[in-house]
Each structure stands twice: as C-alpha cells, then as structure tokens.
Image: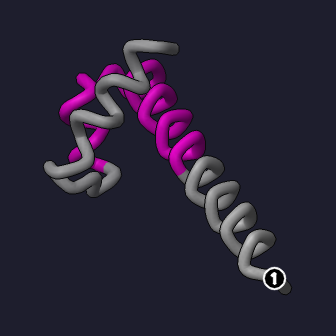
Amino acid sequence: MCNLSKGVEEKGRREGHREGVILSLMNLMKNMKLTKEQAMGALGIPESEREEYTRALAKK
C-alpha cells in the first residue's frame, strides 16, 4: 500500500473513532442523564481531549 493510501486510511479511522466517541457521549447524556463531563469520565476520555469533544458536541 502506498504512503498516500495509508495516510487516507489512518485519517478515516481517526474520524470514525471520533464520531463513535461522540455518539457514545450523546447516548450516555440522553439515556443515562449524565452531564457531558460525567459521560466523558465514564468513557475515560483524557482531560487533554475533552475540549475537542465539547466543541464537537456543541455542533451536534
């Protein structure tokens, strides 16, 4: 596989993972009535990544 294909594949995986985490956060917040901070804690999201997910949730 060429380097370009590997890069595209890796980017797709990262984006897919990110979308899965966002969906999980939304489900925890809706179904379990958790705050976004509680949901991120339940999923073990590192503090260093929480601002990114907070911004993403605001767009949904």
Q: Quadrant of the N terminus?
A: bottom right
Question: Which scheme is used to colour this image of the protein?
Answer: one colour
Q: Position of residue 22 (x, y in %)?
A: 49, 35
**Residue at 69% in and 55% down:** 12
Q: Nearer the viewer, residue 35 or 17?
A: 17
Is residue 52 inside the magenta stretch? no
* Residue at screen point 42% across, 26% down: 56
x%, y% of residue 5?
A: 80, 71
Where residue 7 sits, quadrant-wise, is bottom right
Residue stretch in magenta: 18-42
Q: Residues within 10 Å of mark 1 (few under 14, many from 20)?
A: few
Q: Is residue 60 left or right of residue 16?
A: left
**Viewer-side residue, 45 vs 8:** 8
Q: Amino acid at mark 1?
A: Cys
27 versus 45 height, above or below = above
Q: Whole-percent x and y of residue 52? A: 31, 36
In the image, is residue 36 above or below residue 40?
A: above
Marker count (numbered): 1
The residue sitting at 33% across, 23% down in the picture is 55
Looking at the image, the residue that sits furthest to the left is: 47
- List the single residue furthest toward the top: 59
**Residue shown at 30%/27% (left/top)?**
54
Q: Position of residue 45 (x, y in %)?
A: 28, 52
Residue that badge 1 annotates:
2
